[in-house]
Amino acid sequence: MNTPPSPPGAERTDGSSVQIGALVPLTRPGWIEAGQHLLAGLELAVREVNDAGGIVGRPLELVVRDTAADPQKAAAAVDELARLGVAALAGEYHSVVARAAAARGDALGLPFLCSSAVLDALTEQPTEWVARLAPAQSHGWQIYADFLLGAGHSRIAVATQPSVYWASGARILRDYLAPRGGTVIELDMRALTPAAVCDELVDHRATALLLLVGHPEPAVSIVKSVRRDQRLAEIMIGAPAGQPEFAEWATLLGDDSAGIPFLRYLPERLTPLGAQVETALRERLAEAPSFVAFEGYDTVAVLADVLRSHGADRARTAESWPRVAVEGTRGRIQFSRTPGISVWQWAWTPIQVVDRDPAEPDRFRILHASLESTEV
């Protein structure tokens, strides 16, 4: 049973559909391109669920709310969606925003399947109401640190801005690299211009600079400044948070966009479902889908399976996380309790370190991969 899409802002109140509240950043200062890819994956999966008969004959419907990377706006959206009667929450890209949404979902007894945010402490206390598809930051960023060491980098500078997410990333890198002979030098972008960053890199004899800063600024300006400084011709710029994943990065930086390794959550080979979804997403987005689009699709695939099996009762959805076993686009999705992680976690999503090929910036090169990446 398929239903025409509702106009923006329209809500169904007749109870005929099963509703999922979708949290996505669609306006600045949110990362709009990430939000668009996340929403494309969510919407494609909803369309396919409805083409296949919906949720026991009832259409599945997304009720979309723009978070604009604002934790308070997200918390207010969760309150509204709970009042509207959604069966569950899905989505969100920004970690600090997902944390606010998870806290409200936990308090209200509204299940939340987080698509993309990686912050380890998604909730302050362990919760039964929240599950997550993206890998925890500590897991992914340790894989990135292994890549750095393997590439011969032990003096690593990190350009940082104030944020729970960036501070957590810097701490993970420091704690992992220090026992292995690595040094992490923090550069506070509140006090430094992009040009001053270059002087600091020279003074500290850093061989790598990691961008733990916002996109597009100041990340783009830092890259341009470093690339133009002849003293730093040999330095590696890295972006573990994934800024180079999206086309906007290449548009803004041109040739300077290439050769900047980042984390993405894809296997070497997609599942058969993933290959089909990739084709459909490419058509929907008019460009190659990012890993964030696959995260969106997999989120709805999991929620649809739970809703078909257990109905739209919120408590039964939350109780079902440990019994999930769904074939997603990137592997078999199951949730478990992981030490140090407060939510139900898919352990682990395949992880790669990739960059844009300097010879062809629209093509990605796989530089390093977790073992999970080869198991699909």
Image: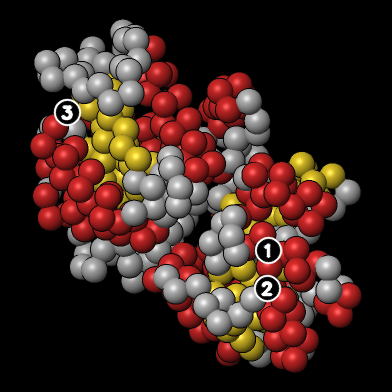
Q: Is residue 11 above or below residue 259?
A: above
Q: Name the residue under label 1.
A: 221
Question: Along the polypeptide, which appears first: circle 2 or circle 3?
Answer: 2
Is residue 102 positioned above or below 193 on the image? above
Q: In which quarter of the image is the N terminus?
A: top left
Res 308 seen here: no
Whether label 2 touches label 3, CB < 8 Å:
no
Q: Is residue 336 above or below residue 277?
A: below
Give me the C-alpha separation between circle 1 and circle 2. 6 Å
Q: Relative to the observer, which residue lies in front, 361 or 352?
A: 361
In which quadrant of the rendered view does residue 217 lie? bottom right
Q: Name the residue under label 3.
A: 311
For label 1, the crowd category at 10 Å Cα-Cα, with few meaning under 14, some 14 to 19 and many 20 or more, is some
Circle 2 is placed at which residue position?
Answer: 194
Instruction: Estimate the spatial distance between the alpha carbons at disc 2 and disc 3, rounded to whole Å.
Output: 53 Å
Residue 246, horizontal then vertical, whole percent: 62, 45
Q: Quadrant of residue 89?
A: top left
N-term-proximal mark, 1 vs 3: 1
Helix, strand or loop at label 1? It is helix
Q: Quick one: label 2, few (<14), some, or many (20+) residues within 10 Å?
A: some
Mark 3 element type:
loop
Tell me which amino acid carries mark 2.
Pro
Residue depicted at x 11% and y 49%: 108
Please tell me whether mark 1 or mark 3 is closer to you in this view.
1
